[in-house]
Image: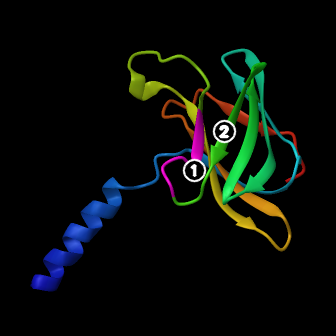
Amino acid sequence: MKNFFLFLILGVFFSLDAAAWRESKSFMLKKDELVKILIKSEGQERLLNFRWTLYTDKGLVVHESFDRIVGQHVLYTGYTNQSFRKVLLPSKRSQKDVPYVLVVFKKFDEGNATAQMDLFLFDKESRIVLDYLTKK
């Protein structure tokens, strides 16, 4: 009986912690290899692109551009600053409805000089369509 309750509690915990993202994609990128993603939404098409330029002291320098607005981030695996977030559309009713992408630095392969970066699309209302323009 004790095992049943433990199983039930774990099942509830994992169902509450289910993936909130709608879509995900993983990239293995070499230095200056550009990822281009066309963001289609509500009659608009905007371009999101990112690339990394430097890996030093376990930090990855990432340059990104969305709708001609540029940014630069230093990301570290296993820390709170291992990702950057881009809001894609304004909210409709509440801040919980805001669609965004999260780009996460997962690991760096020093032998191949490649960085693994994962992209997650959070979009509860399915307002966004992603079109990957790179070969990856």
Using the image as rendered, state which of residue 62 and residue 99 is in the foreground: 62
Q: Residue 122: horizontal and vertical position, in percent?
A: 54, 38
Q: Is residue 63 above or below residue 96?
A: below
What is the image's colouring? rainbow
Q: Name the residue located 45 percent from the left edge and 26 percent from the top edge.
A: 97
Q: Could you tell me if the residues under marks 2 and 1 are in contact, i.e. CB atoms within 8 Å?
A: no
State the extent of the magenta-drawn residues as a range.
79-85
Quarter of the picture containing the N terminus is bottom left
Q: Does 13 sit left or right of 80 as displayed?
A: left
Q: Residue 13: horizontal and vertical position, in percent?
A: 28, 61
- Give the label on residue 82, or none: 1
Q: Does 1 sit left or right of 113 as displayed?
A: left
- Determine which residue is flagged by label 2: 73
Among the 4 quarters of the image, the one containing residue 37 = top right
Q: Does the segment drawn in magenta span residue 109?
A: no
Q: Residue 43: horizontal and vertical position, in percent?
A: 72, 14
Q: Name the residue located 63 percent from the left edge and 48 percent from the top edge.
A: 75
Q: Residues within 10 Å of mark 1 (few under 14, many from 20)?
A: some
- Secondary structure of residue under mark 1: loop
Q: Name the residue located 52 percent from the left edge and 45 percent from the top edge.
A: 21
Quarter of the picture containing the C terminus is bottom right
Q: Is residue 25 above or below residue 2?
A: above
Q: Residues within 10 Å of mark 2 (few under 14, many from 20)?
A: some
Q: Residue 35: horizontal and vertical position, in percent?
A: 82, 43
Look at label 2 and name its amino acid: His
How many numbered discs sit on the rendered protein?
2
